[in-house]
Structure formats: C-alpha cells, structure tokens
Amino acid sequence: MRRLTIVVSAAVVAAMVCVAAAPTASADNQAGGAIRDGSPEAVVVVGASGVVASWSGLPRGGVRLRCGYYVFDIGDGSAVITDYPDASVDPVDGGAYVLKCWNQAGHQVLDVLRVFDPADPFAGVAATERAVDEARRRLELPAPRPALNPPGEQLVGVPTWLWLDAPPVTGSATASVAGVAATVTARPTGVRWDMGDGTHLTCDEGTPYDPSRPPRDQHSSCTHAFTHASTRQAGGTYTVTATVTYDVSWTATTGGSGELGALTRSTEVPVRVSEAQALIR
C-alpha cells in the first residue's frame, strides 16, 4: 500500500471540501464516460467492505470506471492520502474524502475532494451518462396500430392498403442526476412491414383508405398483393408485423449531446388470405 503526501494548507483543504460537496459538471467531464453507440460508461464505487454503489449503464456489461473514497488527515500543513484502490474505505454520510477513479487501462482519471452523500454515492461521476440512461429508461414510445383495407380477410391478387391508425410522432423524456439534466429524443424515421409471406416493405405511416370515396380517387404508396392463400400457415393466417424505427439522440445541460442509435416498436396482427372462387353457371 502506498501513501501520497500533498503539501497544502488545512484552510485550502477545508475550502476545497466545502466546494466539492455539490458535484459539478467539470468533475463529470474529468471522469470521462462519453456515450458511444448507446453504451454509457459503467461505474463501480468500492469500499473496504465491498461495493458501495454500482451503475452498469446500457447495455449492461463490465465495469469501466473503478472508484473509491480515501481518507486523508491533516497534520503539520499537509494532507496524507492513501493512494491505491485496495485501500478505499466505507464512506459515511457527511464525511470528507478524496474520491479517486481509474479506467479499465488502470489510468487514474479523477482525483477530487468530496463530502459523501448517500443520495449520490457516485458524487457526480458520470452524471451526464447516468442522466441519459435514466431519461432513456423513461422514454415511452407507443406500439404502432396497423390498419389494412379491405378490412378483415384479404384476397389473393387484390392489393392490400397498409397504414397506421396513429402516425408515429417524436417522443422525449428528461431526467436529472447530480444536478445534470439530460433529455433523450426519439424521432420516427419510417415504418417497416413484414407481411408474413417473405415480403418486406418500407413506407411512411401510409394513407388511410376512405370507404366513402370511390376507389379510383384514392391512392396509396404502401400496398401489398398476396400471391398465395394463408391456408397452409400456422393458424391459417399470415402474421403481419408493423415496425416503427426511431433515431434516438440526447442533449444535456452540460452542453453535451450525442446519438444513441435506433429504437423500434412493433405490433403483430394475424391476416387471413383466401383465393377468390370463380362461379360458373
């Protein structure tokens, strides 16, 4: 175990601890934690008795930042601080410590004075990433409501109109962690139809069919004509799936922003397809 001696006055240390009681965006930036491809930084805080707190981000995976609280004492104008991860302590509410973090490569990326607050055991580390993670968890995107015409049973060779009863709209959610607020926004980019017969279509939300208007006066850019009846399918129907894709991005009050990739929402409907029978008299 190593010990590091920092020559600094007791007054300066006390002042730094007072300021450090409120986590800041700069400390969050020092800790790294940039979000890439939807994978926020993972953080674990380890004490003498084990894990004090951990956050694994999305998707859940291995630890990327290993942190610990370290005691220091001020003697003759110097602060003596334990300087290695296996010497971290179990912090107590209101206690002043040095918070240190190391990345996966073993490089120290954070070394600040903090007053321990059980409400935020990470003391602001990766606050932006944790706020984005929570905002994305709160994001609610409705399942699409597919509609077809003709309603009910379809006929082989007759174009089926496809649309969504409620066009997809942009959704957002906001969360705040350690004084950092993040907003996640999902913007719809298109609708994919899996017709269950091997056909895939990419459309917009489609055009609703209006039964009160003549068919010749209506047009749709999203139609499909089945070529085989569904009698040999499981349950005697094709499973038609409508999937809305959203591009997801985030912004934060720290000024940061980024992309989180794509999210999808899908709905399946069974569709029976029959062949028209010719009647000869």
Image (spheres, rainbow, N blue to C red):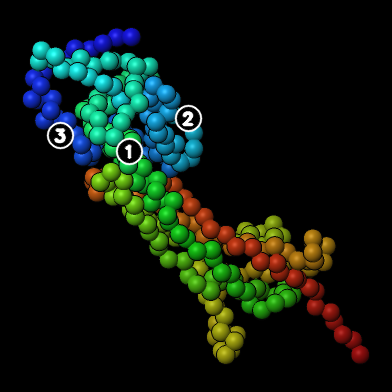
What's the amino acid at mark 1? Pro
Image point (83%, 62%), residue name: 232
Say what secondary structure mark 1 lies in. Answer: loop
Q: Position of residue 182 (x, y in %)?
A: 31, 50
Of circles 2 and 3, which is in front?
3
Q: Earlier in the sequence, mark 1 or mark 2?
A: 2
- Give above or below for 79 relative to 201: above
Residue 149's place in the image compared with 199, above or below, is below
Q: In terms of secondary structure, where does tag 2 sit?
A: loop
Q: Is residue 226 left or right of residue 30?
A: right
Q: Is residue 264 above or below residue 60?
A: below
Image position, residue 7 (x, y; %): 12, 14
> Crowding at label 2, few (<14), some or many (≥20) Cα neighbours within 10 Å?
few
Residue 143, label in figure? none
Q: Whole-Å distance between the Cαs marked 2 and 3?
A: 33 Å
Q: Which residue is mark 3?
A: 18
Residue drawn at x 60%, y 73% as measured from the top left: 147
Compared with 137, 165 (above or below) is below
Helix, strand or loop status at disc 3: helix
Q: Residue at horizontal 33%, vertical 36%?
A: 121
